Amino acid sequence: MNTLKDVFADFKKGLETIYEPNETEALTLLIISEITDLSKAQIKAFPEKEVSAQQAEKLANILTELKSGKPLQYILGKTEFYGLPFKVNPSVLIPRPETEELVEWVISSVRKENWTTGSIQDIGTGSGCIAISLKEHLRSFDVSAIDISSKALQTAKENAELNQVDIDFIEADILNFKSEIEHPKSDVIISNPPYVTLADKALMHINVTDFEPHNALFVPENDPLIFYKAIADYAIQHLTGNGMLFLEINESYGKQTVELLSHKGFQNIKLKKDMSGRDRMVKAMLN
Ligand code: GLN
């Protein structure tokens, strides 16, 4: 028979080459809670509690997948973002906590402007996490979201249904928007585009580089701001007069992104750090 303590020991041993001990501990707690329906406090309090044969088998299967480097969110097929549930699979990037800070910035900026209605567009929506959480909190706004990947859009649509929000999803390539996207002006344009360079990739964990969608992550070495140029050009044509552009950025390119936007004629450009103190997001306006 397997006790919870045994499960912790198996996971600790199985994952020691992949995760830091505290990450393994946190992952194991989350997985046991998911499989047994026990709370984390109960799991901690009763290490001698036995798991059923069926639960033991599920736990063993999850451990095998984790050992391959597969992120837990893909194994479980779900995650949470901004307090909301999202389905995830390898055709979409797993939502990150720093992106929640970007969403927070949009919501507080819109409220500060006292806008009661308007329209928001999310470029490169992936799982739909940005568009859906914005719609959830800014109900009177029309929200649309584009992505180049039809598979990502399928997942984003399922997530909109899961969260019971109405979003207009559009399949399009922002790098070729002129011919493809006919879209009315928006009050807010937001994007978390690909920004990871080869140099960054070398430092990243295999569960990102080997499992998450490359077209959502990586940029060409010779043109790391390619998406920022295209989104800025798009925003120049598609932002309303007092509209706001919000971008998640590569922490190493804060200064360059601000310069790029400034050259393109944006005003009131603000660079903001994430909770880890890294340059992570930019807000800009046309006037
Ligand atoms: N922040 C993500 C990461 O660290 C990258 C997201 C992106 O490229 N837009 O993996």
Image (cartoon, helix red, strand yellow):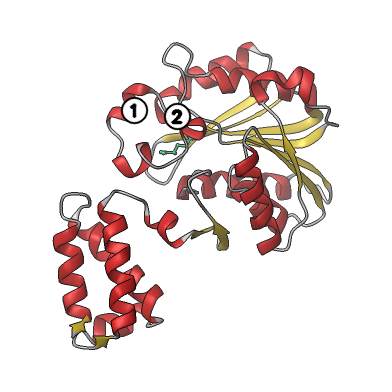
Picture layout, residue 214 above or below residue 49: above
Figure quadrant of the N terminus = bottom left
| Residue mark closest to the camera, 2 vs 1 | 1
Picture layout, residue 216 above or below residue 80: above
Mark earlier in primary sequence (2, 1):
1
Q: Secondary structure at mark 2?
A: loop
Figure quadrant of the C terminus = top right
**Within 10 angstroms of label 2, few (less than 14), some, or many (20 or more) residues?**
many
* Disc 1 residue lies near ligand 1 with CB under 8 A: yes
Q: Amino acid at mark 1?
A: Asp
Which residue is drawn at the image coordinates 35% and 50% (left, top)?
70
Give residue 168's position: percent from left, percent from top: 78, 45
**Within 10 angstroms of label 1, few (less than 14), some, or many (20 or more) residues?**
few
Which residue occupies the foreground of this view, 237 or 182? 182
Residue 27 is at least partly visible in this image: no
Residue picked out by circle 2 = 250
Q: Amino acid at mark 2?
A: Asn
